[in-house]
Amino acid sequence: MDKRIVELQFAHRLLGGNAVALVATRYRDRVNVMPASWITPISMKPPMLAIAVSKNCLTHDYIERSGEFTLSLPGIGLLEKVHAAGMISGYDCDDKLEEVGLRPVAGEALDTPVIEGCLGYLECTVEEAYEAGEEHTLFVATVVAAYAEREAFDDTWLLTEEEAKPLRHLGGHLYSVLSQRISAEPKATDGQDL
């Protein structure tokens, strides 16, 4: 196989295909949203995740001030709105959600809303924050509530209906969806089950 040198500014795209989430934040009576894919689970007990957010984003400011955020996991039907939310800064408009056509709705546990029409939701409270390079903060958060649409998720993504497949971000303007579940269960040998 012929190798290609990847510019270091795009090295993160080798890990691309992560779930894209709509990160909703609230400070006082104002709600903001931005798409993000730099999110990773870091603990099962307690359930925790980490998210990297640019220090230049209004989302960063609101997370620091409120200590909480929600993640709404969209399907392909929200592709254009998700992308539009990444092209506009919350600093540059009065109501970014209205501007891009997204609707906040009450979640289960926090004051910060989730985004209507998504496939899955996580509500998170910040535990710690770390500087990550010159431009980002890594927020470590506990998941205090999680729920999903039945037709999209059981204990994993079902991937049976196109509109119920979670949106993934490849980098830049490129996105994808998962296509199928594949089992890696050990196969039986000599007629015996494992």
Image: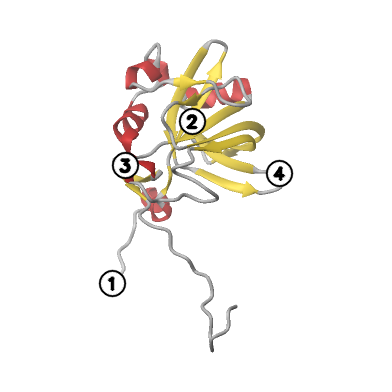
Residue picked out by circle 1: 2
Q: Is residue 94 above or below residue 169?
A: above
Q: What residue is shown at x 51% (from left), y 78% (from top)?
A: 187
Chain-order first, disc 4 or disc 3: 4
Observer able to see residue 68: yes
Residue picked out by circle 2: 23
Which label belongs to residue 168? none
What amino acid does circle 3 point to? Gly
User: x%, y% of residue 184?
Assistant: 49, 69
Q: How many marks?
A: 4
Chain-order first, disc 2 or disc 3: 2
Of residues 123 and 37, which is closer to you in this image? 123
Residue furthest to the bottom: 190
Chain-order first, disc 4 or disc 2: 2
Q: Identify the element where label 4 is drawn.
A: loop
Q: Identify the element where label 1 is drawn.
A: loop
The span from disc 1 to disc 3 (Cα, nearest Å) is 24 Å
- The part of the image, by quadrant, that contains residue 96 is top left
Neighbour tally class for label 3: few under 14, some 14-19, many 20 plus, Cα within 10 Å: few
Mark 1 vs mark 3, foreground winner is: 3
Q: Identify the element where label 3 is drawn.
A: loop
Instruction: State the scheme by which the image is colored.
Output: secondary structure
What amino acid does circle 4 point to? Pro
Q: Is residue 158 above or below residue 93?
A: below
User: x%, y% of residue 151?
Assistant: 44, 42
What amino acid does circle 2 point to? Val
The span from disc 4 to disc 3 (Cα, nearest Å) is 33 Å
Neighbour tally class for label 2: few under 14, some 14-19, many 20 plus, Cα within 10 Å: many
Which label belongs to residue 46? 4
Left or right position of 190 against 79:
right
